[in-house]
Image (cartoon, rainbow, N blue to C red):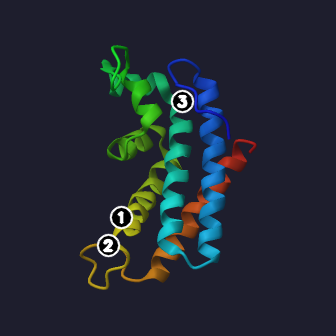
Amino acid sequence: MGVLPKPWLDLAGYKRVRLEEARAEAELARKFLEQGLLRNAAGKAFQAWKALVAALATERREELAKLYPGKVRLRGRRARVDRVDWIIAVMPTTYLKEVAMAIGGRVDALTDKALWIHQYQYNGPDPEGVLSPYRSDETARRNIETLLRGIEEILSSLGL
């Protein structure tokens, strides 16, 4: 994986590195699953998903610019960049669902699973369903596997 270019300087380079990141994180998630490290697998699967959504968002930059107009000041710098480019670069979890909805289709649906998996990563299973949407580790495992299959299929459809 190379150094991550800033999307406001090199959108194609940014996309390429994020796709590489998605593949690498998904591979680590699979290894963690095989070792029974479910919460670690959940974290890596979520990171893979965020990287993939960020890469796919580059293809919808103009559409996303209408949703996220304006400029933002970069932390610790005087430079300002388009808000849409900052969102694509950082892909904050709080924006993930909205961006996925703009991309649409399977990406939108799988983002729901990714967000639940992210919650499971921190809280583990909860038999009462209060702190986690997963009542057991096995249920979480199945959704992690579903998300990883989705990542692999999307990457494959992109020729990766």
Q: In whole angstroms, how far apart are the C-alphas of marks 1 and 2? A: 6 Å
Q: In this view of the protein, which residue sits in the foreground, 26 or 99? A: 26
Quarter assignment of residue 152: bottom right
- Secondary element under disc 2, as helix, strand or loop, is loop
**51 is higher (above) or lower (below) than 36:** above
The reply to whether discs 1 and 2 touch (Cβ–Cβ < 8 Å) is yes
Residue picked out by circle 3: 58
Looking at the picture, tell me which residue is in the foreground, 152 or 118: 118
How many residues crowd around disc 1 within 10 Å: few (fewer than 14), some, or many (20 or more)?
many
Q: Which residue is mark 1?
A: 119
Q: Furthest residue to the front?
A: 76
Q: Residue at x 44, y 44 (%)?
A: 100
Whichever of labels 3 and 2 marks the residue nearer the N terminus, that label is 3
Q: Nearer the viewer, residue 107 or 19?
A: 19
Which is nearer the N-term, disc 1 or disc 3?
Answer: 3
- Residue at mark 2: 132
Q: Is residue 60 left or right of residue 77?
A: right
Cα–Cα gap, marks 1 and 3: 26 Å
Residue 160 coordinates in the image, percent (x, y) = 74, 45
Indicate the quadrant where residue 34 lies.
Answer: bottom right
Percent x, y of residue 141:
52, 75
Q: Give the spatial CA distance, label 3 vs label 2.
A: 32 Å
Q: What type is the residue that disc 2 sits on?
A: Ser
Q: Amino acid at mark 3?
A: Thr
Q: Secondary structure at mark 1?
A: helix
Q: Residue at x 39, y 23 (%)?
A: 65
Q: Residue at (57%, 79%) from the top-left corner?
A: 36
* Residue drawn at the location 26% of the way across and 73% of the way down: 131
